[in-house]
Image: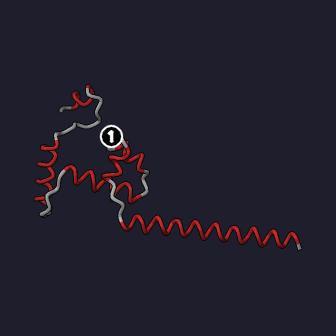
Amino acid sequence: MRGLDCINQDKLLPVMTNQRMNSYLKEIADVCGIERNITFHLARHTFTTTVTLSNNVPIETVSKMLEHKDLRTTQHYAKITDRKVSNDMEALRTRLEANQLESLKINKQTRQKGS
């Protein structure tokens, strides 16, 4: 697809077939010395998991970027990484501690006013 074709089809960039894309990915892997079979599907999965969701991009946004019509399709792609779980739990702990400190301050202020 050439530039004019992109405009006519309302696309920003040319859209390749999976076969063509996989062929290019194989060439890139060979040049980089990667022995794993890299496919477009694997690239989409990796992008979804490690680039977007692990960096707190909402799954609804990711779903839209991947042009999924159903959020469950994106959830299938999006395996939750151990790092993501750990980061989320750390954020929760921080919020809970902050809430606890705020409650203690309010209680202390209330007691001081009542004295």
- Secondary-structure class at tag 1: loop
Residue 108 in the image: state x and y as whole percent: 78, 73
Left-right relation of 34 to 65: left
Q: Amino acid at mark 1?
A: Glu
Q: How many marks?
A: 1
Q: Is residue 99 above or below residue 1?
A: below
Residue 24 in the image: state x and y as whole percent: 13, 49
Question: Considering depth in this image, is 8 or 44 the residue closer to the camera?
Answer: 44
The furthest residue to the right: 115
The furthest residue to the top: 8
Query: Quadrant where the N terminus lies?
Result: top left
* Residue in view at x 12 percent, y 44 percent: 19
Q: Please, which colouring scheme is shown?
A: secondary structure
Residue 60 in the image: state x and y as whole percent: 42, 46
Left-right relation of 114 to 4: right
* Residue in view at x 12 percent, y 63 percent: 35
Q: Which residue is mark 1?
A: 67
* Residue in view at x 26 percent, y 25 percent: 8
Q: Tell me which corner region of the image, top left, top right, bottom left or bottom right, holds residue 4.
A: top left
Q: Is residue 71 above or below residue 111?
A: above
Q: Badge 1: how crowded within 10 Å, few (<14), some, or many (20+)?
A: few
Query: Quadrant where the C terminus lies?
Result: bottom right
Question: Considering depth in this image, is 29 or 61 the residue closer to the camera?
Answer: 61
Left-right relation of 20 to 5: left
Q: Tell me which corner region of the image, top left, top right, bottom left or bottom right, holds residue 18.
A: top left
Q: Is residue 86 above or below residue 49?
A: below
Q: Is residue 72 above or below residue 89?
A: above
* Residue in view at x 38 percent, y 67 percent: 83
